[in-house]
Image (cartoon, rainbow, N blue to C red):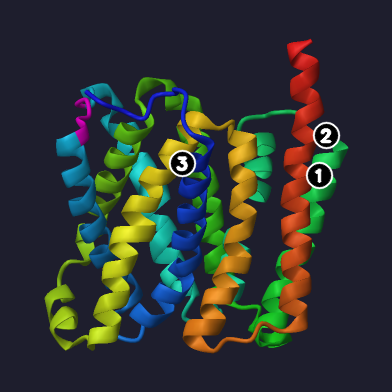
Amino acid sequence: MKSFSPSPSSPLKIILAMTFVVICWGYSPTGIHIGLKAYDPAHLALLRFLLASLVMAVVAVFRGIRLPTLHDVPLLMALGFFAVSLHHVSINFGQQGVSAGASSVLAQSTPLFSTLLARFVFKDRISTWRWGCVVMGMVGVVIVVTGDHGLGSIDAHGLLILLAALSWSVYFALQKHHSGRYDGLTLVCYTVWSGTLLLLVYLPGLLEQMLNAPPHAQRAVIVLGIFPSALAYLAWAYVLAHVDLSRATMTLYLVPPMAMAIACFELGEQPTLMVAAGAMVVLISVLALNLERRPAAQAARA
């Protein structure tokens, strides 16, 4: 069995993998926006991950992955639910009323929710610094949603994007507490497959929408299924196998600017000054969260 196990790797390969991830995940909000013109949110999520599952199956055949134990099946289903089913259905419904650029910023608030989970679910002690980062991040979220379509735009659509970010943070928490059981490639494959299996409840009506969808929407869904939903996950697993998690996550702060640039080019979106200001507040708060961890880690090693 071959896997993404930690080993020496060329810095250029790691940089290229990080760049690939940023471009793929930066395209995702634009691809969703295009796909929603022909598909309803649930069918779009299902078709996207049916394609991703096929790609993962091909990769698994050539790379080789271990079979899961029966004891771990509930965990893998939970990972698929939070990382794929709930996360992407929520994003798709939310993006019906939120621009692609604003959606990418709101989705980047995952570390803020991770801090809240650490305190209220896992009962970890949270420093005053981290609480300040959470409050600042939430202020930035309100600015982004308000600046996207106006004060009256703070409705269910923005909340659904935040639900997707919360779902992603739960996925990260579960993955963190059980990451030692499987290598990165194996965990990604089973997460995508289990999430796709749960999405099959939306199968009725999918074929009809596929037959009626225009070519540009079909292309967007194919790109979403192959690149952000499959190859980017594999590239991210490769990055995490060779780079410290705190350093790797810094790369993800480039996703919202990339998403805004792609949305501007493909959709003609022009982010307002308030959205840009709110994006800066959110990203600075998330960056500050990660910077606060470094001294603590150094003290633990000492």
Q: Earlier in the sequence, mark 1 or mark 3?
A: 3
The amino acid marked with disc number 2 is Ser
* Mark drawn on residue 13: 3
Tell me what residue is drawn at x 62 percent, y 30 percent: 122
In reply to whether residue 66 is colored magenta, the answer given is: yes
Image side of residue 245 versus residue 8, left or right: right
Q: Position of residue 101 (x, y in %)?
A: 58, 74
Q: From what the image shows, is residue 93 above or below residue 191?
A: below
* Mark drawn on residue 192: none
Q: Quadrant of residue 235?
A: top left
Tell me what residue is drawn at x 53 percent, y 45 percent: 15
The amino acid marked with disc number 1 is Trp
Q: Quadrant of residue 71?
A: top left
Badges 1 and 2: C-beta atoms under 8 Å apart?
yes
The magenta stretch spans which residues?
A: 63-67
Query: Can residue 97 be seen at all in this image of the molecule?
Result: no
Q: From what the image shows, is residue 77 above or below residue 39?
A: above
Which residue is denoted by mark 1 in the rendering? 131
Image side of residue 30 versus residue 81, left or right: right
Which residue is denoted by mark 2 in the rendering? 127
Distance of mark 1 from mark 2, alpha carbons?
6 Å
Q: Position of residue 57 (x, y in %)?
A: 17, 45
